[in-house]
Amino acid sequence: MVLTELTKAGIKQEIAEDLSYRYYKNELTHKDIEYLKENFDIKLEKVENNLNNKLSKEIDSVKNGFKPSIKDLDSKISTVENNLNVKIDKVKNELNLILKHLIRELSKLKRALPSKFLILELN
């Protein structure tokens, strides 16, 4: 089992056989353990780098997938904003017309009121 794991980890067959034999005989030296640690650390670094590269590619792929959607949404937002601005301008113009009309009507009422009061006073 140890031999299989060591060869899976990329250790040469002869070295793996020697280390597994000494492992079972409980004869591994400090130097052997350091060798294993260094070898596994190198393998781990390779795996980490590989995973980081794949992850970066996936993130970039997802970002690139969202770019067209974001542009489409930006375009739709701009269209809605422009339509709202046009409608707001129309409402402003209508309100200004109504306000001018009300001012004219109030002016007419002001002019008409004194003459009405005069008629009432005479009666």
Image (tube, grey):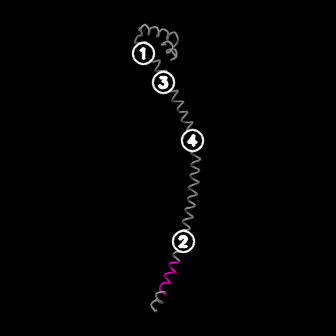
The residue positioned farthest toward the front in the image shown:
123
Q: Is residue 57 above or below residue 93?
A: above
Q: Which residue is mark 2?
A: 98
Mark 3 or mark 2: name the one nearer the start of the chain: 3
**Could you tell me which secondary element the residue under label 3 belongs to?**
helix
Task: Say the numbered circle drawn on residue 34.
Answer: 1
Task: Determine contact: label 4, label 1, CB under 8 Å.
Answer: no
Nearer mark to the viewer, of 4 and 1: 4
Q: Which amino acid does the dot numbered 3 rest on?
A: Glu
Q: Is residue 118 magenta?
A: no
Task: Determine contact: label 1, label 3, CB under 8 Å.
Answer: no
Mark 4 or mark 1: name the one nearer the start of the chain: 1
Mark 1 or mark 3: name the one nearer the start of the chain: 1
**Mark 1 → mark 2, Cα distance in angstroms:** 91 Å
Task: Say the numbered circle drawn on residue 45.
Answer: 3
Q: Residue at x 55, y 34 (%)?
A: 58
Q: Residue at x 45, y 18 (%)?
A: 38
**Mark 4 → mark 1, Cα distance in angstroms:** 47 Å
Q: Is residue 79 left or right of residue 21?
A: right
Task: Say the numbered circle drawn on residue 66.
Answer: 4
Give coordinates of residue 34: x percent, y percent.
42, 15
Q: Which amino acid does the dot numbered 2 rest on?
A: Ile
Tell me the magenta residue range: 105-115
